[in-house]
Amino acid sequence: MEADSPHLRGCLVVFEGIDGTGKSTQIKLLAEYLRAQGKEVVTDYEPTRGEWGMKVRNAALSGERLGLEEEINCLLQDRREHVREFIEPALQRGAWVLLDRYYLSMMAYQGATGVNVEEIRQMNEEFATVPDVAFWLDIPVEMAMERMNARGNDKDAFENEPFLQACADIYSAMEMPWLFRIEADGAIEETQARVREVIRRELL
Ligand code: TYD
């Protein structure tokens, strides 16, 4: 238990990957594992359901994305508020923060839309806490598309195969010492075992 060290900073763990890779399931299972060890864990996602995040979501759901400049501005504003009001306060009280998407999504998705990937990283790291560990859940794009089709939800404006392939190519070229590629095309439990192994090795 952490009760005797209340001022220890928490850990920021981020899950990334194209749509349909199973990020939310893996986050739920990792949260259970950490809570069973007495950790305080909070989970959240980006874009948030706040004003700025909803602008991006609503546009994409309508089938047409915002203009690139407006999309970037909204996503940055959304993340700024998220870091200030949710992520940092949780880390400062010692909680683990598990996020479904963060600024690596912007590098992949707005990068695949034509913005320089390194510039996107710099814009974000001016204000956004760098993760302690990030996972890239890697599955073939065709498999992700099949999972999305099976789910039966209408696809948003990001969810088409050539675009997601471009996003996956950017993820696969990323090199940060805190980013770990996880093969995520097998059973849920196998993927979770790989995730926990990295967490134990790097953070516990
Ligand atoms: P997504 O995680 O797919 O939301 P949900 O699971 O609720 O459908 O996020 C919506 C889209 O936002 C996703 O296709 C990727 C995109 N996105 C960006 O383009 N840039 C970003 O910085 C973030 C965080 C998300």
Image (spheres, rainbow, N blue to C red):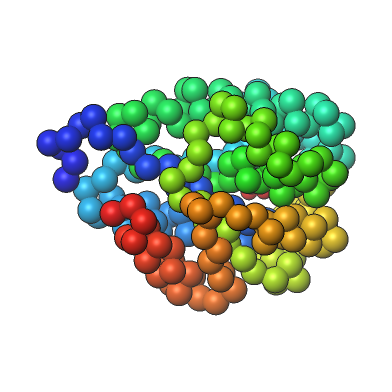
63 sits to left or right of 34: right
**Which residue is painted at 80% across and 35% down in the image?**
59
Q: Is residue 34 above or below residue 198?
A: above
**Which residue is painted at 55% across and 31% down in the image?**
128
156 sits to left or right of 189: right
Please provide percent x and percent y for residue 86: 46, 28
Question: How many numbered markers are drawn?
Answer: 0
Q: Nearer the viewer, residue 84 or 54?
A: 84
Q: Is residue 111 above or below residue 122?
A: below
Please provide percent x and percent y for residue 111: 77, 45
User: Which image quadrant is residue 42 in?
Assistant: top left
Q: Quadrant location of ligand 1?
A: top right
184 sits to left or right of 56: left
Q: Residue furthest left?
A: 4
**Residue 61 appears anywhere in the view:** no
177 sits to left or right of 46: left
Q: Residue furthest bottom?
A: 186
Which quadrant of the rendered structure holds the C terminus?
Answer: bottom left
Which quadrant of the rendered structure holds the N terminus?
Answer: top left
**Residue 59 appears anywhere in the view:** yes
**Which residue is painted at 75% across and 31% down in the image?**
72
Q: Is residue 49 above or below residue 197?
A: above
**Which residue is painted at 84% across and 45% down in the image?**
113
Q: Nearer the viewer, residue 74 or 122?
A: 122
Please provide percent x and percent y for residue 24: 52, 54
